[in-house]
Image (cartoon, rainbow, N blue to C red):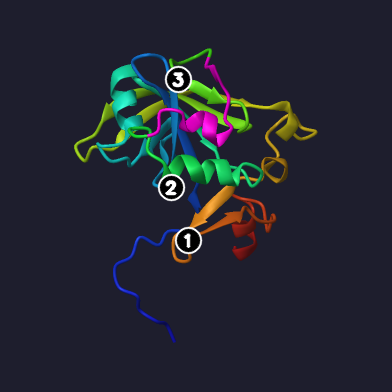
Amino acid sequence: MRKNFGSKTWMYPLPVLIIASYDENGHADAMNAAWGGIYDYNKVMLCLSEGHKTTKNIKKKKAFTISFATAEQMAACDYVGIVSGNDTKDKMEKAGFTTVKSEFVDAPIILELPMTLECKLIKFNEDGNIIGEIVNVSADDSILGEDGLVDSHKLRAISFDPIHNDYLVMGDKVGNAFQEGNKQK
């Protein structure tokens, strides 16, 4: 038996993305967004409303970064999502975030968040969604595994549960992509 809930925005898992940008004066800002993801091979899509300071900044600077919220920085990541950069000019400082300028795009990297996609704006599509090209992925050495790649257990990225408004740490490995299905043949 199944229970029907009607039309809901219940998608699992929703990443907790921290979108960072500079304003016209070079002041860093960031926001928490769950509605975004991969758009194409080296592209991302963000669904941000027009009124966000971040959206305005991206239009002006043509660049942004996407960092993955972590369990260790959960409170700070939640804070930048509930406080508007339009009203709170020092929200990065209040969150405890420090930034450096990306080497690849005109946008900030948040040092406390160990994995960042550095993106240049491609366009705003007909729905107003932001389409960006990933020009670099940077990761702090602290989250790299023995193979030199990002170790998801060290990253401890969180996802958003839209049904219960919970943050969840990404879970355990249960299989190997593009291999497990071969057992069905």
Q: Which of marks 2 and 1 is in front?
A: 1
Residue in the foreground of this view, choosing between 143 and 174? 143
Residue 122 shows in this picture? no
Residue in the foreground of this view, choosing between 54 and 158? 54
Q: Residues within 10 Å of mark 1 (few under 14, many from 20)?
A: few
Q: Name the residue under label 1.
A: 165
Residue in the foreground of this view, choosing between 83 and 173? 83
Given the image, on which type of amino acid does mark 2 rest?
A: Ala
* Residue 95 covered by magenta stretch: yes
Looking at the image, the residue that sits furthest to the right is: 146
Q: Name the residue under label 2.
A: 34
Given the image, on which type of amino acid does mark 1 rest?
A: Asn
Left or right of 58: which side holds 17?
A: right
Q: What stretch is highlighted in magenta?
A: 88-102
Given the image, on which type of amino acid does mark 3 rest?
A: Ala
Q: Distance between the residues labelled 3 and 2?
A: 20 Å
Q: In this view, does 74 lie above or below 123?
A: below
- The picture places residue 136, in percent across and down from the top left corner, at 53, 22
Q: Name the residue under label 3.
A: 107
Residue 181 shows in this picture? yes
Q: Quadrant of residue 49?
A: top left
Looking at marks 2 and 1 on the same chain, the residue that comes earlier in the sequence is marked by 2
* Residue 55 covered by magenta stretch: no
Q: Residues within 10 Å of mark 2 (few under 14, many from 20)?
A: some
Q: In this view, does 3 lie above or below 54?
A: below
